[in-house]
Image (cartoon, helix red, strand yellow):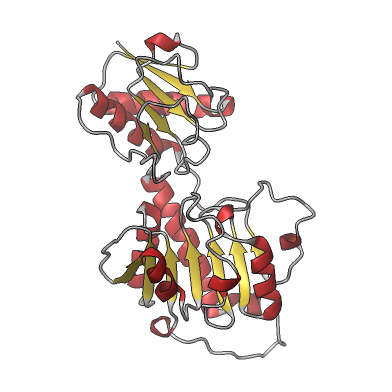
Amino acid sequence: MTNVLFAAETKLWPVYAPLLRAAFAETGLGGITLETDLPPEEVDYIVYSPGSTLQDFTPYTRCKAVLNLWAGVENVTRNATLTQPLARMVDPGMEQAMVEWVTGHTLRHHIGMDRYIHGLGGAWSRIIPPLAPDRPVTVLGLGALGSACARALAGLHFPVRGWSRSPKDIPGVTCFSGEDGLKAALEGAQIVSLLLPSTPGTRHIMTDETFALLAKGAVLLNSGRGALVDDEALLRALDSGQVSHATLDVFHVEPLPEEHPFWSHPGVTVTPHISSETRPPTASRVIAENVRRGEAEEPFLHLVDRAAGY
């Protein structure tokens, strides 16, 4: 008998319970007990989200892995009691959603849709945008989501530069890494998409200095983490015209406080963290596959590097 503890927000249980049980069956796993309350010493796997009431992992001495429901793990990696292997969620549904959000907003700003949607500049104000090959785009973060977005943009013929902390090789994308590579990736970019995890090394990666590297009037898209952007530096860049618009899906504090200047700034679009929500049907299959791997003594998928923080 394999015991799986569902330790996520209570509202998620009726959604995930039937999907996980079906995914376990599809994966060929028999004898699985999936419950929200099990004796800690009898738990083999924990399906987890950081909003769970479970914060002390010490009693779970038999647990083989903690399987996170979200891609972000910054709120759990710092938990000193978590000594079990931790897997983050890499979900095909989430990847597709992020590609759609990033390509949609890239095309929105590339074509200049807002001008006509909002009737800016008069009823017949014709500004012809360049074609995609003449619009340099930079993607910061080349993990599963960032790589998928970079490939999609390259497929639309944008010249795409990508940056990651460790070297990557993606066909059709000019890849940079390390501190020197960051400057090369950002210099002259007209659209920048942030898809990095939140770690001490990525906090406020967009500052006065990095905004100054962009082409005048560049656009910022942030669907990674709010901590990647120095909010005050972004407001200065917007007010000076160095950045013409910022479309932001993630923030330092969520929900974004009503008094925050982003709500009223004409150069900011706020979306309420909708770019890439975990999709329960596909996420359940990812969880089931990792349980299958654990039972077969195969390597887990998507393990978190605690030192790197992602």
The total of numbered circles placed on residues is 0
Q: Quadrant of residue 296?
A: top left
| Quadrant, the C terminus | top left
Counting from the top left corner in percent of width and height, residue 95 is at 40, 51
Residue shown at the point (39%, 77%) measured from the top left: 158
| Quadrant, the N terminus | top left
Q: Is residue 122 left or right of residue 29?
A: right
Vertical order, 188 against 221 (above or below): below
Q: Is residue 169 left or right of residue 202?
A: left
> Taking the image as drawn, is residue 268 in sight?
no
Q: Quadrant of residue 100?
A: bottom left
Residue shown at the point (42%, 81%) measured from the top left: 132
> Taking the image as drawn, is residue 275 in sight?
yes
Vertical order, 72 against 260 (above or below): above
Counting from the top left corner in percent of width and height, residue 275 is at 52, 53
Counting from the top left corner in percent of width and height, residue 82 is at 44, 27
Q: Quadrant of residue 160?
A: bottom left
**Residue placed most toward the observer, 43 or 106:** 43
Residue shown at the point (23%, 33%) measured from the top left: 299
Vertical order, 253 against 127 (above or below): above
Residue extending furthest right?
A: 259
Counting from the top left corner in percent of width and height, residue 142 is at 37, 59
Residue shown at the point (31%, 70%) measured from the top left: 173
